[in-house]
Image (spheres, rainbow, N blue to C red):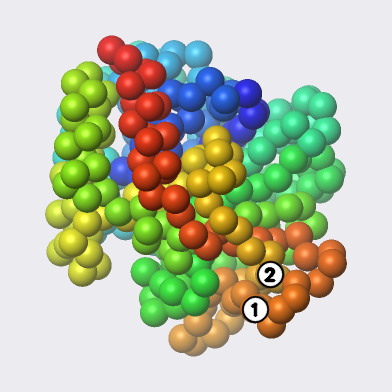
Amino acid sequence: GRKIILDCDPGHDDAVAILLALGNDNIDLLGITTIGGNQTLHKVTYNALAVLEQAHAYSVPVAAGCASPLIRELETAPGVHGDTGLDGVDLPKPSHDVIGKHAVDFIIDTIMGNEPKTITLVPTGPLTNIAMAVRKEPRIVERVKEVVLMGGGIHVGNWSAVAEFNIKVDPEAAHVVFNASWPVTMIGLNLTHQALCTPARQRDIESIGTPTADFVSHLMDFFRKSYAENQGFVDPPVHDPCAVAYLLDPEVITTRKAPIDIETKGDLTLGMTVADLRAPAPADCHTQFGEKLDVDRFWGLIHDAIAHIGEG
Ligand code: BDR
Ligand code: CA
C-alpha cells in the first residue's frame, strides 16, 4: 500500500481520517504525528492514541510534535471540537504511549530512511511540524512522493471570511510548505464542503453495527451540533478524510493545477490560500487543488474502512 504519515490534530474529522487510513489495505500508515491545533498538543496526542485504541491498532507509532505555531500563539477550536478536542464520545483509555521521538524527527527519519519518492505526507492540522521538518532537513523536499493536505480553500474561509483554520493558525508554516518545490495537493474547504455527513450517510455507517461504527456516529452527532450552532451548516463537513480518500482513489476527487501562495500579512486576508486561476498554470507548477468530490464514492470508502476494522 501507499506509505503515508498522517500529521493531525484530532479532532472529529481527523479521527475519521485515521480510521479511513487504518481500514484500507491500500494505505500503509507508517505513523501518526500530532500537532497543536483543534486542541492543545497534549489533548490531541491523547486523542490520537485513543482512536488507535478504539480500532485496536496497536502497532501504529504516534509521535508528538509542536505545541504551538512558528511565531504566533496557538488558537484552538473548542467551539467546533469541544473541550477535549473529541467531545461527544467515551474515549477508550490508551494502553500505549507516544514513541520517544519528536514528530519532526520522526517525519525526517522516516522520509530519509525509505526509498526516494515512496512516502506521502498527509497533514490535516496546522503545518508547523511539516515546516519545521523542511527547515531542519531540506532534503526531504526532493525525497517525498507528495504532500496531500487538508487546509485552505479556493477563496472560501471558515476562520475568517477567506481563511481556513489549519492555514490561519500557522500561516508562516503554510508559507514554507506551499513554497517548497514538492508536489502539493490542497484539499481545501471548496472541496470538503461537499463531504457533508447527512443523516442518511450516518445511518449507513451505523448499520455496520460495530463499536467503531458507533464511535463514528457519536462523533458525527457532536460535529453536527457544533457546525449547526457555530457555522450555519445543516450537516457537518467531514474535511480531513477527503485527503486520505484522494490517496486511496484519485478518481474520488478531480484536481486542477494552479499556483497557490499564502497570505501572511493582510489585515483582512491573513492565512488566505491565494490561487492564481489565470489559466493555464505554468509548466513548472507544483501545486494543485481538489475541485469536485464524488460524494457516493467518498462515503463508500468511509463505510468500507469502518467495516474492515471489524470488531475494533
Ligand atoms: C480543519 O480544521 C479543523 O477544525 C478540522 O479538523 C479540519 O482539519 C477544517 O477547517
Ligand atoms: Ca484537523
Percent position of residue 263, x then y: 59, 77
Q: Is residue 20 visible?
A: yes
**Percent x, y of residue 157:** 41, 72
Q: Is residue 41 or residue 58 the one in the foreground?
A: 58
Q: Secondary structure at mark 1?
A: loop
- Asked if the residue at label 1 sits under 8 Å from ligand 1, the reply is no
* Residue 128 visible in image: no
Residue indicated by mark 1? 277
Would residue 159 appear left or right of 168 to someone viewing this image?
A: left
Give the residue type at disc 2. Answer: Ala
Q: Is residue 199 above or below residue 268?
A: above
Q: Is residue 152 above or below residue 18?
A: below
Q: Are marks 1 and 2 in contact (CB under 8 Å)?
A: yes
Camera-side residue: 140 or 227?
227
Out of 37 and 158, give the one closest to the viewer: 158
- Where does the N terminus fall, quadrant-wise? top right
> x and y percent of residue 148 in the render?
60, 48
**Residue 138 pos. (x, y %):** 81, 48
At horizontal 73% and vertical 53% (from top left) the residue drawn is: 183
Question: Is 231 placed above or below 45 here?
Answer: below
- For the point 22% across and 19% down, which residue is it? 210
Q: Quadrant of residue 312?
A: top left
